[in-house]
Image (cartoon, grey):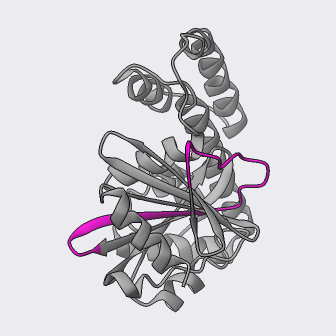
Amino acid sequence: MLCAEVDKFIPAYVDGEFAEEDRVEFERHLAECARCREVARFEARFKASLRAHLRRPALPLGLRERITAQIEAAPVPGSRLRRFFYRSVLVAAAAPVLVALLFTGQAQTLPVVQESIHRHQRNLPLDVVGPDRQRVSTWFRDKVDFPVRPPGLRLVGADLLGGRVTNVRERQAALLQYNVRGRKVSVLVFEPGDLSLEAPRVRRIGNRTIYFDHQGLTNVAVFRDGPVGYAVTSDLPETEMVQVVSAALE
């Protein structure tokens, strides 16, 4: 595969649109070509930053998706620098709408909770499949800048389905997916830094402080394990979520 071919398909690769066979060939080239690897990394970070900024306000149903789709679908000829400048102008043009919505007085859910629920509710393709926890952990080793250790969840009979690279705001993150007795459980792993994890309800599980929040029937439990943050998301009742988090801490 030549660099010129890679350039054409980097946006599709970053968006997870490749079939497994094509992804393997594409990633083989990225592993060997520092230039294309950096271009792909730039594209991923740019899109992650753009989507994170569009998610910050509590937008009316469908507006966020329309803004994002129009920006990403806009034809931009020329160099990568020109495309970056053009899309930045579009984001700036949308900013007054977003700022106005931000100050409508609506209560804001913790960003990590919002983003955990958003990813949980989408059926995104997995970059690596389970159930081997060590294999999944090793796959993430050169994809993110922190260790990804999938919780075993053995005590609740969970099966690790796999994971994919994602983001929390501008931060790298890993999204792990589990099947717990026929129900999907998502685990977002990230470096929280100074990002607040203090959701409304607090529980002590063992010697850990766990924060709980919800939107509708979807519950989220957020906690730290050293420098790494976790957000566990499911439509399981909170009592069962406590069991899942307890298993994750084993």
Please state the horizontal and vertical placement of residue 103, each as a whole percent of the image: 60, 11
Residue 56 point in image, percent of width and height:
58, 30
Q: Residue at x 54, y 10 (%)?
A: 104
Is residue 94 something one can see in this rendering?
yes
From the viewer's perspective, is residue 177 above or below residue 99? Answer: below
Residue 215 lies in quadrant = top left
Near-viewer residue (236 or 72): 236
Residue toward you, 225 or 37? 225
- Image: 205 above or below 196: below
Which image quadrant is residue 233 in? Answer: bottom left
Residue lying furthest right: 194
Q: Position of residue 137 (x, y in %)?
A: 56, 83
Left-right relation of 107 to 186: right
Task: Residue at 59% x, 53% y: name it.
Answer: 167
How many circles with numbers are drawn on the protein? Answer: 0
Q: Nearer the viewer, residue 186 or 78?
A: 186
Q: Is residue 35 above or below residue 156?
A: above
Residue 53 picture location, percent across and down: 61, 32
Residue drawn 66% across and 48% down?
45
Q: Quadrant of residue 50?
A: top right
Q: Which residues are magenta?
A: 180-202
Image quadrant holding the C terminus, namely bottom right
**Can residue 125 be seen?**
no
Residue 233 or residue 39, whichever sits in front: 233
